[in-house]
Image (cartoon, rainbow, N blue to C red):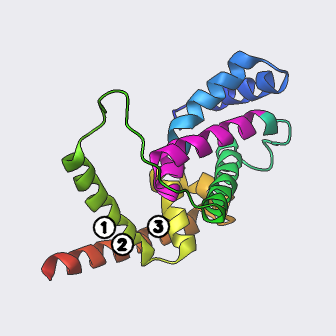
Amino acid sequence: MSEMDEGTRRELIARARRGDGVAADALVRAYRPSVYRYCRARVGDHETAEDVTQEVCMALITGLARHRDEEHSLSAFVFGIAARQVALAHRRRYARPEDPTEQVPERADSTPGPEEHAEQADTSVYVLELLSTLPPDTRHLLMLRIAAGLSAEETGQVLGMTAGAVRVAQHRALRQLRSLAEAEVRR
């Protein structure tokens, strides 16, 4: 999330609760990039990550009335919503698998070419394979800390852990991933 001082954040929340669209938009703009990174890391593809991110942003706006600053930080609230929306996206994906259809595009694709995609895919597959060796809770912790950019305190609020426990778990997970990667290189 982009840096925002506590006073500004509280003011934006209060204004958004009163129906101020500019304040709500400012909150969404502040959280959207890190929510997208988190969703992209959890769902794996751009289109689904965009859809889930949009759902999270809408839920943020409609859910501000339920959020209480005293209970959790807004980041914990937002990423709690994101975790639920990612889970729903996974359920929807497996409930109705998509059938590819052949369509001829109307114009040339300006996105990266096959070589770039192959390199990105290889790297993504490698990282996901390494991450898959970790327990699901540890993987989720790393996604919140690294992909979403949450602080240890915010991650702890989402996962029901102390900030110290988050830091220890993150350190152990990264050390384990480093060892696995180094062992892979030596082979």
| Amino acid marked by disc 1 | Tyr
**Circle 2 is placed at which residue position?**
130
**Circle 3 is placed at which residue position?**
170
**Circle 1 is placed at which residue position?**
126
Distance in Å between CA atoms under marks 1 and 2: 6 Å
Residue 55: in magenta span: yes
Label 1's element?
Answer: helix
- Which badge, 3 or 2, is on the more N-terminal residue? 2
Question: At x 74% / y 49%, what residue is drawn?
Answer: 72
Tell me the chief SS of the magenta region: helix
The answer to whether 147 is drawn above or below residue 19 in the figure is below
Query: Quick one: which residue is furthest to the left in this view?
Result: 186
The span shown in magenta is 36-61
Question: At x 44% / y 74%, what residue is drawn?
Answer: 132
Tell me whether the residue at label 1 lies in contact with that at label 2, contact meaning CB atoms closer than 8 angstroms: yes
- Which badge, 3 or 1, is on the more N-terminal residue? 1
The answer to whether residue 113 of the structure is visible from this angle is yes
Residue 108 in picture, x, y percent from top left: 29, 30
Label 3's element?
Answer: helix
| Amino acid marked by disc 2 | Leu
Q: Pick the residue in front: 33 or 12.
A: 33
Residue 24 in picture, x, y percent from top left: 71, 25
